[in-house]
Amino acid sequence: MTKKEALCVLGSLAGTALLPSAGLSHVLWHRGRRGLAAATLAAGFGADGLLLSAFLIPNLPLTGRMFFRGCRTGGSIALTFDDGPRQPFTGQILDVLKQEEARATFFVLGENAMRSPETVKRMAAEGHRVANHGMDHDILMWASAGAARMQLQLTDQALREAGADDPAPLFRPPHGWLSPLAHRAVTAAGYTVVGWTKGVWDTASPGVEQIVSRTAEVLEPGSILLLHDGWRGSRAEDRSQTVAALPRIISQARARGLAFVTVEELIKQAEGGCPA
């Protein structure tokens, strides 16, 4: 399911959920029960908003828990990249990370791993963690448990065949959307569902200055930064702005006393009890 299709279904369901309360409110209003009519309509809008928020706010735990921030104390921060690998951008990002001696977590698409196995192998060989972002960026907002398991299994197989012998047990759903059934299936399979602290929206190519500026707003202990090194399919999207912004992002983080760790390390720190 594409993003557009998922949003259309969500809008239809939200509208359908509002109809009963709107109808009852109409009847009550015309019977002179205007206070109750208003309360009924407000409740309908509240339920409607809750349904929309459950999916459109990725870190809202209404469909299941998502790890999106580590310890707010200490000095650790996680740098993550989605949708790759895609050359030349992933290779350029790896070059920067190697030069800066910074580690990152790459949430890889299975279909892109199959296209660029040598890049996936390089990620793992250079100390980064390779994690699961699904096979084809299919939206899992309405996915069944079986569909979610299939995405995990196919991607995990693709990562291993590409040279990531020990992929991280982490899953970042495309756009952060995951149905309750899919969420339970993912966690039952031993994966931690991972979100992000704040999106930088580098996919919109807003300019290097904007990417650096937006990232600076979230450079604090425990943050998970979301950037992109690839895209789905054959669309010729450009990630050169992300590549150009990366050295400055790393420099700003270190100037604030922050050290880059993997998402797994952030999770381990949080589970072990955050430092005072």
Image: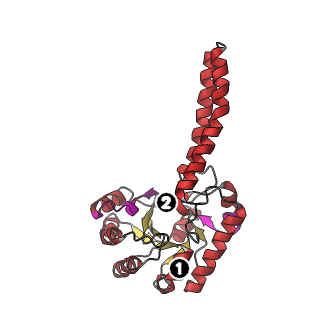
Percent x, y of residue 27: 67, 20
| Pointer 1 with pointer 2, Cβ within 8 A | no
Percent x, y of residue 121: 50, 85
Determine whether the residue tagged by mark 2 lies in a helix, strand or loop. loop
Mark 1 vs 2, N-terminal side? 1
Near mark 1 (Cα within 10 A), the count class, few <14, some 14-19 or many ≥20, is many
Residue at position x 63%, y 44% from top? 13
Q: Which of 94 and 238 is in front in this view?
A: 238
Residue at position x 30%, y 71% from top? 244
Answer yes or no: is residue 166 visible.
Answer: no
Segment tinted magenta in the rendering: 185-208
| Colour mode of the rendering | secondary structure
Across the whole image, how many numbered discs are drawn on residues?
A: 2
Residue extending farthest to the top is 32
* Dot in front, 1 or 2: 1
Look at the picture and state if 120 lies above or below 109.
below
107 vs 19, left or right, is left
Q: Looking at numbered disc 1 in the image, what kind of residue is underneath it?
A: Ala
- The dot on residue 92 is none
Percent x, y of residue 209: 27, 61
Answer yes or no: is residue 121 visible.
Answer: yes
Q: Is residue 108 magenta?
A: no
Residue at position x 31%, y 62% from top? 212
Residue extending farthest to the left is 209
Q: Which residue, given by chain and number where applicable, does mark 2 sit on?
A: 196
Q: Looking at numbered disc 2 in the image, what kind of residue is underneath it?
A: Trp
- The dot on residue 113 is 1
Q: How far apart are marks 1 and 2 (CA)?
A: 22 Å
Percent x, y of residue 28: 66, 19
